[in-house]
Image: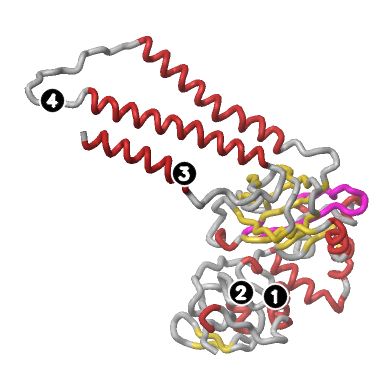
Amino acid sequence: MGMAVALLLIVVASVLFHILSPWWSTPLASNWKQMDDTLLMTLAVTGAFFVAINLFVAFILLRHRHRHGQDRRAAYEPENRRLEWWLIGLSTLGIVGLLAPGLFVYANYVAPPSQAMLLEVTGQQWQWHFRFPGKDGRLGTTDARFVSVDNPLGLNPDDPAGLDDVMVEGNETQLPLNVPVKVLLRSKDVLHDFYLPNIRARMNMVPGMVTSFWFTPTQAGRFEVLCAQLCGVGHHNMRGYVRITEPAAFETWLAGQHTFAQLRQASAAPQAAGAMLGKALAQSKGCVACHSVDGSASVGPTWRGLFNHSVPLADGSTRQADAAYLAESIREPQASVVKGYPPIMPKTVLSDEEVAALVGYIQSLSSAPATTGAGGTNAATGRQP
């Protein structure tokens, strides 16, 4: 009796929680209302089965409960063809109701309209790279053998279609409002997942292949990009942003970005070679995924204002963040861990020239002092100012 009442209370509480819950999905920022409708349909089917099964169990418990003074035994019935056919039929209808709408939505999800603009996203531990086609409307070809410090995405330098490709530096890009976008997804290392929670669009990024989906931004704003696949110790910090703006503002922003040809030309200039090499290394090796360059708090100490700062270490000692200390920390990350930061930096094999370029880049970021983070803690040193 008590168990039957408990089941009835669970059913009533679950239905009321769904009806009165404040945690409804946020308004979509894309055209994929079909995806929300499919999720609601799935919830309706599974919810109906949940209510029906629990009410049936409660009825059985009440109907066939033990009564004092009665000697009742369950009837032995190893087979019941009629009941089995009913269960098979209802289960089939439930599975079709769950799967069929999703198949139609997914088929549309990966079939963009012909006029959709292209955006390529490359995932790397633990950062995002964005690339747009140039005026020719075509993305240049890529290959792993072309990956280098000044060409982290591996664009083919002999492909004319890639020379005018627009390379977006950093983890933030922009897209035009109410324009369909086909997103091409690649991974340089491990399995990632490009996920826009507010737009509720996502797709796996598999090394060695290109996946894709499309959507139409219908709401202006700045939306966070997350990686929805566990991709290593810095997975939680693999974040980026997509800013949705008016088409005119987007075109102005896009015109201000560098093309592949411009970046290669700049990296070849002697006066900019050192700074460009250090910045490119920080991007290609994934350093900027854990070390910010603007003083904001991150997984590791910020590089802004770090050079020649006195930093407290986890063992209680203090070191001066000069060129020698920075070179040692790059080569042997676990040798002198800064206090307040986890020892998760992987060891990376770099040449002397590459280490010097990274140290030079960190030094170039020290023209202004580091900002202080939450609680008044210096983001570069971990100390109270």
First in sequence: mark 4 or mark 1?
4
- What secondary structure is marked by label 4? loop
Point out the stretch of residues depicted in magenta.
124-143
Report the Cα–Cα distance between label 2 and label 4: 76 Å
Queried whether the magenta region covers residue 140, the answer comes back as: yes
Report the Cα–Cα distance between label 3 and label 2: 52 Å
First in sequence: mark 2 or mark 4?
4
Disc 3 marks a residue whose amino acid type is His
Queried whether the magenta region covers residue 360, the answer comes back as: no
Q: Viewer-proximal residue, 244 or 135? A: 244
Disc 2 marks a residue whose amino acid type is Ile
285 above or below 67?
A: below
Circles 1 and 2 in contact, beta carbons < 8 Å: yes
Disc 1 marks a residue whose amino acid type is Leu
Report the Cα–Cα distance between label 3 and label 4: 37 Å
Name the residue that disc number 1 marks. Answer: 358
Instruction: Name the mark on residue 330.
Output: 2
- What secondary structure is marked by label 1? helix
First in sequence: mark 3 or mark 4?
3
- Nearest-to-viewer mark from 1 and 3: 3
Rendered image quadrant of residue 149 = bottom right
First in sequence: mark 1 or mark 3?
3
Name the residue that disc number 4 marks. Answer: 67
Name the residue that disc number 3 marks. Answer: 18
Q: Is residue 359 left or right of residue 233?
A: right
Report the Cα–Cα distance between label 4 and label 1: 81 Å
Q: Viewer-proximal residue, 43 or 301? A: 43
